[in-house]
Amino acid sequence: MRDTPTFVDLSHVITDGMETYPGLPTPKIADHLTRDAAEQIYGPDITFQIGLIEICTNTGTYLDVPFHRFADGHDLTGLALERVADVPAVCFDRRGERWIDISTEELDGLKGHAVLIHTGHSQHFGTDAYAVDHPHLRQASAEALVDAEVACVGIDSLNIDCTSTGERPIHTILLGAEIPIIEHLTGLDALPAKGFTFTAVPPKIEGAGTFTVRAYATLA
């Protein structure tokens, strides 16, 4: 008999008015059809709810594809599912580090893997501290990830890049190599270093370079 897998949710809950990234629009979640209104259409005790959501594509836990950075890069419709669905994964513990180094040696044998970076910074999500001194990768780490031909890269921080300037070398390097980026992960403390798979699939939206995902890990 096959063992039942354990799922670990790695996504933030999206709520009306929540802030993900300072300065970006916050989501508006409301009813298009209320249950009371549905009874007027369908009859007594026959109720349905249809929601209406106005949302910035960079809300909650989300994924970036090349179009986010490059005008000629592929959008969400071009995302290969083998990069983000049930992908063998590893989790690097980098708690306590602000400038994160990942060496070529650490990435040996990880071609086609999802690489998740556990900084612990997600504990500050929803507070002012989340945008202050957030952990991020060094450029050499991004170059090593490209050389290793990883499937995708995720981090539980405000941004995979340093945001103190307008430069975004990590996005440029990874998305230039068509490696999707998943930011604002959470719950990485529940993961082992290896031996699990990772999934973070967005809707298939034409003309979008980022969108919210339900990210999760599957433990055997």
Image (spheres, rainbow, N blue to C red):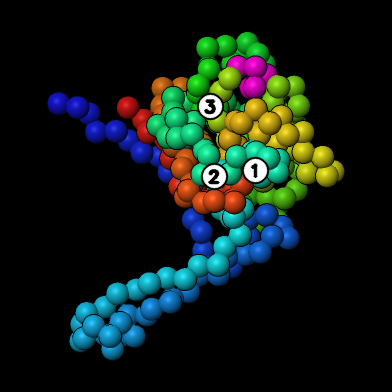
Q: Which of marks 1 and 2 is nearer the N terminus?
A: 1
Reading the image, the residue beneath label 3 is 151
Q: Around disc 1, counting alpha carbons within 10 Å, would you say few (fewer than 14), some (14 to 19), or many (20 or more)?
A: many
Q: What element carries label 2?
A: helix
Reading the image, the residue beneath label 2 is 76
Going by the image, does 176 lie left or right of 154?
right
Marks 3,1: beta carbons within 8 A: no
Which residue sits at x=23%, y=83%? Answer: 42
How far apart in space, not on screen, are marks 2 and 3 (Cα)? 15 Å
Which residue sits at x=34%, y=85%? Answer: 37
Q: Which of marks 2 and 3 is nearer the N terminus?
A: 2
Reading the image, the residue beneath label 1 is 67
Return the x and y of residue 205 as percentages of the image width and height.
Answer: 51, 51
How far apart in space, not on screen, are marks 1 and 2 (Cα)? 8 Å
Q: Give the range drawn in magenta.
A: 144-148
Q: Which of marks 3 and 1 is nearer the N terminus?
A: 1
Q: Around disc 2, counting alpha carbons within 10 Å, would you say few (fewer than 14), some (14 to 19), or many (20 or more)?
A: many
Q: Is residue 219 covered in magenta?
A: no
